[in-house]
Amino acid sequence: MPVARDQKVGKAKSAPSRPAPSVGNGGPSRKLGSLSSFQATLNFSILPQKSSSASTSTPARPSSSNGGFTKRNLVDDAKLMPPPPPGIRPKPLPSVFKNSGKIAIKAEEEVVEVLDSDEEDSLPKNQQSSRRVSKDEAHGDQMWTELYAPTTEAELAPGKKRIERVRNWLHEALYGHPQGNVPLSGGQSQASKEKIRKYKRILLLTGPAGTGKTTTVRLLAHEMSLELAEWEEGQEERSIGSGIERESSMSKMSSFLSRHSYAPLNMSSQSSVSSSSQRTAPERPRVLLLTALPNTSHLPTREAFHAALLQFCKTFTSTSCPLIIVHSDAGSGGRAEESWMDRDRGGREGAVELLGKDVRDGPWCTEIDFIPLAPTFVIKALNRVLSIAVPNLSHRPPSSAIQLIALSCNGDLRSAINSLQLLCSDRSAVVGKKRKNRNDDDETSPSVRKSSGKGSRGGKGSKLNVSEDLRAVLDAVTRREQSLNLFHALGKVFYNKRLGDPGIDDDDQEAVKAVESLPSDELLPRHVRHYGRTKSMVQMEAFLPTIPVDASSFALWVHQSFPSFCTDIEQTSNYLDELCFADVLRTDDDIWQSSPQAIAYSLHLTVRGALMALPSPVPRNHQKILKPQFFAAFRAEKENQALLETAAGYLAKKAVASSVALSERGLRDDIDSEVPWGGVSSRYVLAAELLPMMVKLQGMTSRPLLPVAVRPLSLPPFFVDATCSEELVANDVPEEDDYESLAAGEDGLGTMPDGQGWDEEDAVAAEQEDMAWLNDDDIQDWD
Amino acid sequence: MSLWVDKYRPRNLDDLHYHPELSSRLRSLAASGDFPHILFYGPSGAGKKTRIMCTLRELYGPGVEKLRIDQRVFVTPSNRKLDVNVVQSNYHIELTPSDVGMYDRVVIQDILKEIAQTQQVDLNAKQRFKVVIINEADALTRDAQAALRRTMEKYMNNMRLILCASSTSKIIAPIRSRCLLVRVAAPTTDEMSKVLHHVAKKERFSLPETAAQQIIDTSSGNLRKALLVFEAMKMQRPDLSGDIEVAKADWETYCGKVADLILQEQSAPKLLEVRGKLYELLSHCIPPTVILKTIAERIVDKVDDTLKPQIVHWAAYYELRMRMGSKKIFHLEAFVAKVMT
């Protein structure tokens, strides 16, 4: 058999050169190409190339000409294939022709064009190959996400409002006034503009990955003709790879920031002028873009980063340029990427953590949060990409596939487009194997490349068993890392399908078979008979690895929506018991308990407990699966803890101040002199005893006992009630007034310098907070 | 303006209203010149801190009340920086190392070493040693307690420790044996009423007996709470006469309402509602164990006698679970569901 194979190869090698003798030294390379094209893998490298051509050409290319190209290419293929000697045909070819038989037939009608492409072929080999290399470098690993990035604002996927905000911010940061709002002429407006610009130093774009943050910035920058100076981590540093280089990259980053916070010298004179006459200014204003953030979980790095940012904020000159930080926080969507530990540590590893408290709470920083895209937006965007990338309607994947991708991407457009690309390339891999031997042609001219792209998808024209193919392909494409969609996973648990349930649909047949094939259980002894259940349709071993979040967050998800699937409270109680067990197993304190075994056990317990406790069949009345309240509550708790610290600090300061006052008064014991304040008390006492009462007293007497900042610590009324909340507000006003009078009046002796300073500090801080949303008048007052 | 709790806090051992034998013992200890390490323990609001401060005053005189506050930065071996607020006078230093969680050992070691290695500078000082007050000593980790034990012996010359804890059970035996244990029991009803009347007299009004009784009943031996409630009630209704509603902390009322909610209807939707309330409480830093306890007490008050033991049983069961586990809400809710069944 090996011998026979060799023969075939030999034939195949010699065969292609025959119909195109003019190729000359280009011949051998193509022969090899034609051989290798039998391996489907090679198709991948080609795809981006042709699509790159699509991007360079206008989307509005008439589709008729494209069709022509396709045919010609097929003819190309056909021509390169020798008229097969009887008996020894290269194997894959027949199948290819079968698949695209229709087109192949058409192709033969246009033999004339074959000659054209052949002439292109006849370029010297080395020239071709060199060109090809360069092409590969340029487009070889381009993804559709980059190639077909939106070019106009209308094409951007995020909501219009957000884009508008970003645009306004950019405009304000650069020119000192909102767009459209024509600045007043005169020196006054000049000054105020400078001030606005001074407080528009950092724009933080947050949101899950793939929601178009960076794209928006780039596009807007392009549109407003700004120069984006982007920080990129040097490649070479990565390769050195030890602890020290981290720091060095950090220092590079900070120097990047400080370097770029000033415009280059030659520009500076112009740009200060240009802030009044922006449009005509010859040079392009510059914006810094920071997408690759340093490793902020490493403390020294984070501190250095914060310091650098703060420094950046504080050094403002009229010529310095604003900074945009793009940060995808995976966690806020409650998605898989963020582990429990991360959440524990920083709540949401949010803006504060990232930028540092000073920067975040300072007046310089604006945050715009992008939310995951709705499937409709994703579909829209996918269709747009598709319309450019695959101009021929019949070659596009069906709209059902696009919808599926859109739904399964979790609002991540980037992954959706990647899926789409993979989907399309997969199809081509199935049918377009022969395309490979035209590799060289592909690079010769955009039009030919274009056509080859056609050819790749040409096979799709034959609608043979699409549904099955599609399903298989989509399975591979859309289920990233084989993980189920979170909702799918939860649904599997909640619907608790068991063997013999009514209403099992066709999709489940496979599973039914698998479950039925299991050996039947023995009847349970009487004392545990009430634990008897029919066989579950959830195949645990297969199911558990596909859960997309970690065990403890999965428990939270299950926990949140569980009660609505129960028919009575007993079931709920049983399940909560299991959750308790699972939670006790998995605690972070202990080394064993956070070990993989413990986590696995607790996950099993979570899922099996749920299946055990749920009624069978589960009544379906449109229960909703909700996001756990836990995260919000946890964040609130963290915030309140910080407030508690503030309150504790406040009380301690008061205590200190009063004790100082006390001792200075000659250490007399008269009660009516200075009264001491409470000292340091434990957090628990503070939270549970002191603060609630102090809040109460404060409310009743309008005596200032606590700083304004800790007000959120007071519990909201039990049932939300309009009058109560109004009451709170009413109490608020005298409170602040009293502060001033307290600081100034009662301590007229000057015995409480500390307290006084502190209260004012507070007021200033409050004012600064207002600054974040100010208009220019405010700034002037403040300055 | 300050709270009555602080305003009428006794500052002298002689001013203390109850536990006179304890006061006299502390006084003689302070006078003896051979002051030991002391571990004060007793329930919250019994007056441990007050007694500690009084003792210090006895030791050093009024100078000890001249406080200042410091923010110290400690660096852990893993290069993490910890900020700890430290209240100190010339003669003593007070800290709550358990605030920094698992890194308390570092704080303990650094502070103690620092104190121990500096001699008393003030020549007028009555004592040659300084005092280190460690709050919430029972919340210290094992590591920290072990570190404490070593330093206690080593630096006996110029440093004394005063530990303050709510129970000795979580303090390792070596420390207990090195300290003089001083139990500060919660004041009895009579003692509390004495204090309340004393405060009322100082504020120049008279406290009706019924109101005093009500306050004492709600505060269950916690004098701090009693005084806070007292002050709140006074503000609410200046004459304090007749049938007056006892002022409670918001969260207590809240817990009570949650308990009522539980008893009202036992169903899954109701459970969800309760869950929302529990989250609300938790997010306001009310300790989950306290929530559980308050709710359980309220339920026990309301249910049939035959059910009471069961409810207490489950409350205890889930509180233990809660201490072992990490997600408090599961356990709280499991308790609620259990009660509902």
Image (cartoon, coloured by chain):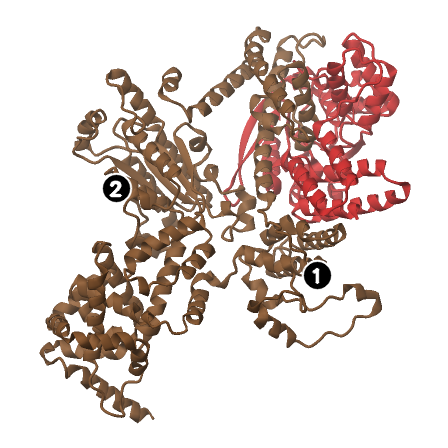
In the rendering, at what x and y percent does residue A181 appear?
A: 30, 25
| C-alpha gap between disc 1 and disc 2 | 58 Å
Residue beneath the point at 45% across and 48% down:
A374
Q: Amino acid at mark 2?
A: His
Q: Nearer the viewer, residue A309 or B272?
A: B272
For label 1, count other residues whose C-alpha is less than 10 Å away and answer few (under 14), some (14-19) or many (20+): some
Q: Image quadrant of residue A641?
A: top right
Q: Which chain is brown?
A: A
Which chain does the residue under circle 1 lie in? Answer: A
Label 1: which secondary element: loop
Colour of the chain lettered B: red
- Name the disc covering residue A616, or none: 1
Residue beneath the point at 64% across and 12% down:
A663
Q: Amino acid at mark 1?
A: Ser
In the rendering, at what x and y percent does residue A46 appear?
A: 27, 67
Residue beneath the point at 79% across and 16% down:
B15
Which chain does the residue under circle 2 lie in? Answer: A
Q: Image quadrant of residue A102?
A: bottom left
Relative height, residue B328 to residue A66 (above, below): above
Residue A228 appears in the picture as rendered:
no
Mark 2 sits on what residue? A222
In the rendering, at what x and y percent does residue A752 appear?
A: 57, 13
